Amino acid sequence: MRYSPALQEARLIKRYKRFLADVTLADGSQTTIHCPNTGSMRNCAPPGARVWFSQSSNTKRKYPFTWELVEVDERYKVGVNTGRANALVAEALAAEIIAPLTGYKTTQAEVKYGHENSRIDFLLSEHAQRPEQLCYVEVKSVTLGVGEGLGEFPDAVSSRGAKHLRELMQMKEQGQRAVLLYCVQHEGIEKVTPAYEIDPSYAQLLRQAHDCGVEIYAYRARISPQEISLQDAIPFCFQCMR
């Protein structure tokens, strides 16, 4: 996925009110940009960090700039626009980059399902070898790096994430295939684990989902100010060692 028009660079002053951030532009002026991230952005919003933002052509927007990337530890780029995660996965599915999810003829996005009024991110069907079995794929964006290559999810208590796990377990119990796919938008993350200290209930439910047959995968994005794409399979583990 190439950024078009090209991203612009700035320095972060602060993030506030959840969806706003103030930045300093290259000419020294300051502006407010939209922050498209509903999480805590823990470890992803250090004041003074390099950031990159896109510009919308929609003249009706109050804040035409959207925060896309941040550099953490003066080394790793992180995609903070969680809205990009599904687009990255859709692109990777079409290119057959996600090996466990190849072989399906049809891909549908945002399909209603389950008893809790959910929408599955992707519904795959008409597999060459299992045409009668549907595959439900839930996508979660991972940006929380905690050091030594370890990434955690979620970065804040996530009742919505728990709901999606219950829905996936229900699909599995009905004989369908259920997949949780972590889209890792952080160059420094080499493996993913549940964030036990942040949301122990989610971690416990994730273990239950795994034990009942929900498949869990993690794929990491390659990130630059010019483009971002999902490329590398990395390990998911319940007890990762740093």
Image (cartoon, helix red, strand yellow):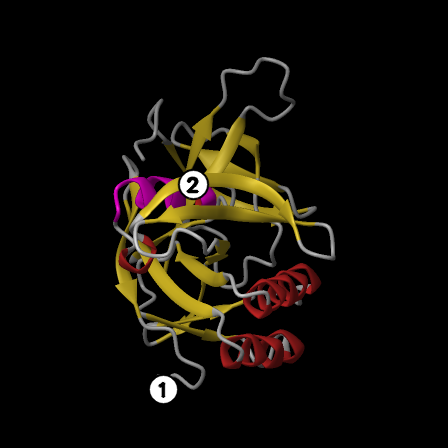
Q: Residue at x 51, y 68 (%)?
A: 153
Residue type at numbered disc 1: Met
Question: Which type of secondary structure does the marked residue at label 2 adopt?
Answer: strand
- Tell me if residue 57 comes above or below residue 149 in the rendering: above
Looking at the rendering, the stretch of residues picked out in magenta corresponds to 86-96
Q: Position of residue 15 (x, y in %)?
A: 59, 48
The residues tagged by marks 2 and 1 sit, at their Cα atoms, a distance apart of 36 Å
Q: Residue at x 65, y 50 (%)?
A: 113
- Tell me if residue 64 comes above or below residue 209 in the rendering: above
Does the stretch in magenta take in 91? Answer: yes
Residue type at numbered disc 2: Thr
Please state which of residues 237 and 106 is positioned toward the viewer in this rendering: 106
Q: Is residue 174 left or right of residue 48?
A: right
Question: Of marks 2 and 1, which one's residue comes earlier in the chain?
Answer: 2
Magenta residues: mostly which secondary structure?
helix
Quadrant location of the N terminus in the rendered image: top left
Question: Which type of secondary structure does the marked residue at label 1 adopt?
Answer: loop
- Tell me if residue 109 comes above or below residue 100 in the rendering: above
Please state which of residues 54 and 159 is positioned toward the viewer in this rendering: 159
Of all residues, the one furthest to the front in this rendering is 132
The residue beneath circle 2 is 107
